[in-house]
Amino acid sequence: MVLLDGKKTSADIRKEIALEVEELKKNNKKAPHLVAIIVGNNGASITYVNAKVKACKEVGFESTLIELPKEISEQELINKINTLNNDKFIDGFIVQLPLPEHINEENIIMAINPDKDVDGFHPTNIGKMTLNLPTFIPATPFGILELLERYKIETSGKNVIVIGRSNIVGTPISILLGQKRNVGNATVTLTHSRTVDLPKITKQADIIIVALGVPNFLKADMVKEGVVIVDVGITRVEDTSKKNRFKLIGDVDFKEVSQKASYITPVPGGVGPMTIAMLLKNTLLACKRK
Ligand code: NAD
């Protein structure tokens, strides 16, 4: 079994990005600038957003964190977004999800200028992605493609099963892997909570992408020998032995499934760090496109 090491691969990508930033600066061009907006004080969101801002600094980007109170109105948040849309010194920005209940996520995503939407969530960018046109691919599916590519995992003609149909992971990765592209040309089945007899389907899979958010959901008796496993799930579970009092659990029962898999991502250290690296890649792209 080979570990799909997202920590190492993302470090390689960050190094490549840092070199490109140095090159930009040498040519008297400005470094890419990413802004992250966070609304409220959700613990997991704060951790993710801080990791993104830290990663920006490490590769030589400029980065700004905008922290807004959870009581902020939808209109006030849209006003903030409009300011960023019109600021020519900002290449890309993200609004960390989830948002407080009184704010409609769709309205917020729609307010972002698609040229600065480095999360790739705007319908214009999703549309371009679906048509296989140049765009910002959402960071998590982008990270999965990159991981498969760098480990030279063949996807062409393979039977891929995706578990979970979210707009940010399951649906886009199922579209991308089915496309005529370098890491693509697969026969993809998108499964979800209404799928009947999931184990019968997963047992046919050459590659399984698991993104449902149920810890240890995928068991060894649901997969065939030699399967490639990409575990996107991250659930925080209390662990008093840890300094921060929680641990991260994936959607795959790693102990069992790794016995049968040919390649598998660990949690943590698999898809998570790749997501951050690809956000940086999208921001660099936004800067170069301007
Ligand atoms: P989500 O929470 O929006 O949706 C879950 C999906 O799983 C739904 O489409 C649902 O139909 C499906 N589902 C639920 N129960 C199922 C079952 N029993 N069988 C089959 N399908 C079932 O999904 P999300 O936002 O993609 O998040 C999924 C997981 O991935 C979460 O743990 C999340 O924290 C994690 N995540 C990780 C990263 C990363 O960078 N590693 C990024 C995004 C999300």
Image: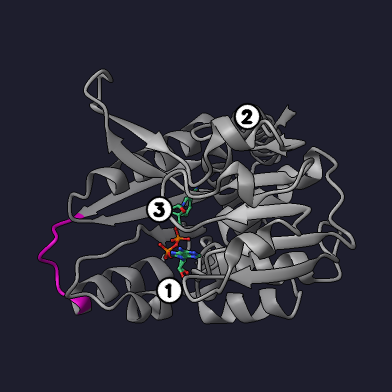
Q: Give percent across and percent down for residue 159.
A: 80, 62
Residue topped by disc 3? 35
Instruction: Inspect this view and state whether residue 60 appears.
Output: no
Of the image marks 3 and 2, the number of the one nearer the N terminus: 2
Residue topped by disc 2? 11
Q: Is residue 219 left or right of residue 244?
A: right
Foreground mark, 2 or 1, reads 2
Q: Give percent across and percent down for residue 32.
A: 55, 48
Under mark 1, the amino acid is Ile
Q: Which mark is residue 112?
A: 1
Kindly report the distance in space between the C-alpha atoms of the residues bearing marks 2 and 1. 29 Å
Quadrant of image for the N terminus: top right
Q: Give percent across and percent down for residue 49.
A: 36, 45
Which of 57/244 is in front?
244
Instruction: Inspect this view and state whether residue 152 appears.
Output: yes
Under mark 2, the amino acid is Ala
Over which residues does the magenta segment extend? 68-74
Q: Which residue: 41% across, 40% down?
A: 53
